[in-house]
Image (cartoon, helix red, strand yellow):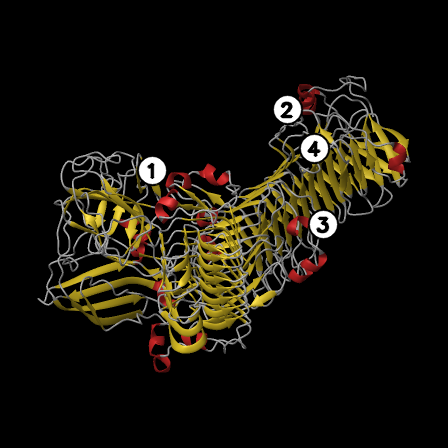
Amino acid sequence: MKRQPTIVWLKTTTTLSSAMLFSLAMGGFSHANPVDGQVVAGEAAISAPNATTLQIDQTSHSAVIEWQSFNIEAGETTRFVQPSREAWTLNRVTGNIAPSRILGTLEANGNVAIVNPDGILFGPDARVDVGGLVATTHDIANDDFMAGRFHFNQPGNPAASVINEGSVSIADYGLAAFVAPGVRNSGVIIAKMGSVSLASGNSFTLDLYGDNLINLTVDDEITEEVVDISTGQPVADLVKNEGRISASGGTVALKAATARRAVNSVVNNTGIVEANSVGTSAGKIVLGGQTAGTKTASAPVQRVKVSGQLLATNIPTPTSRPDRGSGGHIIVTGEVVEVAGAIIDTSGEGGGGTILLGGDYLGGRADDATMASLGIAKEASPVPTASTVTLDSSTTLRADATDQGDGGKVVVWSDEATSVAATITARGGANGGDGGFVETSGAILNIGEETNVSTTAARGETGTWLLDPNDFTVAASGGNITGGLLTAQLGSNNIVISTASQGTPGGNGDIFVNDQVLWNANTLTLRADRNIAINHAMALQDTAGLALQYAQTDSTGDYFINKPVNIASTGSFSTRGNSGTTVNYTIISSLAELQALGLSGAYALGTNLDASATAGWNGGAGFEPIGSGDIDGFTGTFTGLGHTITNLTINRPTEFYVGLFRNTEGDIRDIGLVGGSVEGASVVGMLTGDNTGTITRVYTTGTVIGGEEVGGLVGSNGGSISESFATGSVAGQSAGQTAVGGLVGFNYGSISESFATGSVAGFRDIGGLVGTNSHGTINKSYATGDVTSNGGDTVGGLSGWNSGAVKNSYATGDVSGDDYVGGLIGGNSGTVKNTYAIGNVSGIGAVGGLVGYNDGGTVTASFYDMQTTGQSDTGKGVGLTTDEMKTASTFINAGWDFTNDWDIDPAINNGYPYLRWQVASTPTPDPEPEPEPEPDPEPLTLDPFPSTFSTSSDPYQPTIEVTGSGFSNVTEIRWTWTDPNGNTGTVVWNAANDWGNGRAVLVSDTSATVSPALVAAGDPQGIYQWEVTVIAGSQQITRSFTVDYVQVVQPVISTVPVIPQAILNPAVSVQDIIDRYADPDAPQCMLGTLQCVAAYPGTTAIPLNSSTILQPYAADKTYTVTQDFGGTTSHHKDSPLQWGIDYQMPSGTPVLSMSEGVIIAVEDNVEDNKNGNSGVGNYITIRTNSGVYITYAHLSRGSLVNSSGEPWKQNDKLSAGAPVAKSGNTGLSSGPHLHVHFGTSIVKWRDATVADGSRDVTSPIDI
């Protein structure tokens, strides 16, 4: 053709600037069709049939043509006529004058490659209809091209781009490849059964004999600022699709080499990419940027973004009916993968396909056997792993079987952090098939509240959702998933939470459940490399299952049941430890099932059991101990799952081996025996008479009586006891060698991290923890109870006799006996190391502050307080002053380990050394069971509920409990009553305000109609008629009953508004009530039983609640509150004293203990109106059994005495309602009054040790 006169020649070494590229591409040159073609390889003829058409007739299989320029203007056509569909023509632009502009029509029956180092633009009106197309800025050697070696390894302009804004149609099974430093498609590219590649790179290889996809060169980099030749602006995304790409039955790939400059993304899809199935040929879509492991060193973040649609489905459409097959494959990977507002779908009629975002299952590290066990396939080639992945709440991932087949496989993986808030489904088919598999993994994994995952199957088994982080916390806030969301998702998935102690950032491989989880079907599996801690109540209803797989790679790991796990008898529970053996448990739900327990096998207590009825069993002998003496013991596994057995009675004074179990050789853990009593002749313990197995985290609070070898937990121990305690009194009635201990009577096994607090009495070999330690070991344990010998000897605060090893242990109780009496050990022939004692010691023979009599044993680095023990002996322990005993250097200099074992804090243990495990993060089980959710029975009911009820103080003790499958439909509950004078009242609760998930919260709040007021102080005594009506859809049930209300006079509060009485379902916390009533500007208090709320602007309300809490004065008295919670009239703002109450009270008024507890600190030497300790005057601080601290202040001097008139001292015990002292006017006091305040810890306030009632306490306090 004739050359146009406006052509400008440039040297081949010239690099065009960004402005020049844009100017030239947008019309700086006006060329008609390609110009000056020269055939340099192969055979072809160039002709012009007419003024607007250029035709190339090729006779060889391959040909290379060099052009001065290659442009096609609007209305023009360039046509290649080739010998076959497989023929190739390489069109190389050598003029180096401008990017190519394809604005008209390009046709070819074979394959066409266009190479222009300055870029190629397919304009909006471009129409490309070819067998195959390569458009690139990178050149290839002629010999390689002609030989079919498609190595495009000669980079073009590093700032150039290839842009498609037109319509590109590729023949079936053909390919389209657009490769340059920058590539953008805003048009349409169609390649049915073929492949489409958009790639950013400087060199590549086209695999004609594989998948027709391009392979970028390893370590390739985009170093320059790339320009979009259509807009003239720097590209924000190296590869971007904002149009439509369709390769039905084929493959689409968007890839990028390493970007050396920071860009918005290396790959970004905002358009539609389709690779839907054709027949049984499933499609595949790959979006790939470089990862942290594949990018070149020091390169910026390589980000891949998806916000459009990626579709690789196998679903009929109005114009397409593929064969019934599975969906296709979609893979997105890069260093950072961000998915927002996207639809990614691989659903198929015959089965769901595969979606991999950021990596394959377990990052591609799973072995074939593991994947086969899950029924999922491993990818043919490794999938590079992302560093971070985020999926927003407007994103949907689908891999469903839409007709008959299994759900597919969806993996969201990152090496570092994954955040998910999307909808993800891998459901089984409507007409058959099982649910699929979903994985969301990352070293740090956060699941947003908007997340919704489903692997359900209408006619098959539900699938699995795997969450695979390093550490994982279920929490209401601040965790990785909320309990509410986990609860909801268990309705549509079996869920596996699996943690690992590896990766970046590393973790410990722990799982913490800190929020309530309730579900009624499917299985929750918690798999941890190390520990699993259940720190909040869980409830499994119906067929729900729980599997705990702990210590999978760390043999020191364990599982900790710190709150109850309720399991219905129809549910399932299993464990698997480091040994790899799975243990399946039988659920125990009744006393009858407990009594019938077999001697082998595995059992789990699914609920709390009230054993009060056992007092009348077997003619008064009570519960029959499990087993048959010392021969046939229990060899299985028994876990209480954090539950309690209350008021168990065993009354068998002539029998040996007596306890809940007679003899245990297996494993017992996580159970509390609360209250009750056990009596036997010999070898008697609340849990078991004899143990040669393992006991872990078990506690007892009842009374134990026996002859010999009697312990609060175990009579005789030859096994292992750890993290366990006993608080009840223990008495040995034999006049022989009784071996009586607060925890264990006779020990020849091991005891660690355990304690006893109850009083111990017997004749000989008596100890606060162990009666006789015969060649056994006691480590990191303590006893606080008083130990008394009834005329015998060998009496110790910790152990009566020791021939074994005692180390890192202490005793604080008083010890009295005749001979061989010691604050820690009565008689010793073993080893004693790193121990101390502080209790008063008294006797008439061999007596010592630490050891009474040392019979050839060794005592090393062990001490006693000479002032508190009243002893000053030597050679059996070192006597020190109280101040020395409270100084850390005393013990550190003696070689004690104050890093791992011990510590000293003035606010803990009265300033004496304490064991670090006592304040460790994994708490000791609470002796008092807390309310826990109960499974919903069928149908909707108000039963069980008493028809009559009698009370002397509180007409609201009955719990109105609505249960049943219809609960979710409950819209209204009405409570009406009639008093003895004929007055009627009604309270109405509605679903919008008054109850939560699964249970009614029956509270009279501002939204309820109350007329007249609820029963209060001064209301008539007599029979009240009550009626409860529940409306649930078409159901309406009513229950009537009566209350015999005995009038009492309740205290009056003058300055604090009264909160209406709340009726709480066991599943509802006090905080639910507080949230409803707490006014941040008006502190509140409700009396009767004391329920107080400390509220202050900007803080969370602090409830103080208990069914047994008392006012600090007599019930028939009335006193005025002159300053309430948060008051600063006289309390120091932000001080520990601020969160208390001042009662106007005459000096000398008896002050009563509000709760059972132990004295932490006491002061009784301040005169009236004298300052004393920081203004609090005479005071006493106690710690309740549930860990709350209470300080009573401004007390009268000389009034802080017990019932015997003796001064209170540290570690003395107080029962609820017992006299503490008398009110006064000591310290900084403007007049006679009583000050009371609360805290969850203690603090040194100047010279006083008081409850820390500062404003930063934000959690509920249960006294």
Report the Cα–Cα distance between label 4 and label 3: 26 Å
At numbered mark 1, what does the secondary structure look like: helix, strand or loop?
strand
Report the Cα–Cα distance between label 1 and label 2: 71 Å
Reply above or below: 311 against 599: above
Residue to which mark 2 is pinned? 232
First in sequence, mark 1 or 4: give its number: 4
At numbered mark 4, what does the secondary structure look like: helix, strand or loop?
strand
At numbered mark 3, what does the secondary structure look like: helix, strand or loop?
loop
First in sequence, mark 1 or 3: give its number: 3
First in sequence, mark 2 or 4: give its number: 2
Residue to which mark 3 is pinned? 250
Q: Amino acid at mark 4?
A: Thr
Report the Cα–Cα distance between label 2 and label 3: 33 Å
> Looking at the picture, how far across and down is residue 1179, in whole percent?
24, 43
> Splitting the image into 4 quarters, where does residue 1193 fall?
top left
User: For mark 2, does the 10 Å Cα neighbourhood hold few (<14), some (14 to 19), or many (20 or more) residues?
Assistant: some
Which label belongs to residue 359? none
At numbered mark 2, what does the secondary structure look like: helix, strand or loop?
loop
> Splitting the image into 4 quarters, where does residue 578 fall?
bottom right
Can residue 742 be seen in this snapshot?
A: no
Q: Is residue 123 left or right of residue 58?
A: left
Residue closest to the eye, 687 or 142: 687
Residue to which mark 4 is pinned? 258
User: For mark 3, does the 10 Å Cα neighbourhood hold few (<14), some (14 to 19), or many (20 or more) residues?
Assistant: many
Report the Cα–Cα distance between label 1 and label 3: 74 Å
Which label belongs to residue 1244? 1
Q: Residue furthest left?
A: 981
Report the Cα–Cα distance between label 1 and label 4: 60 Å
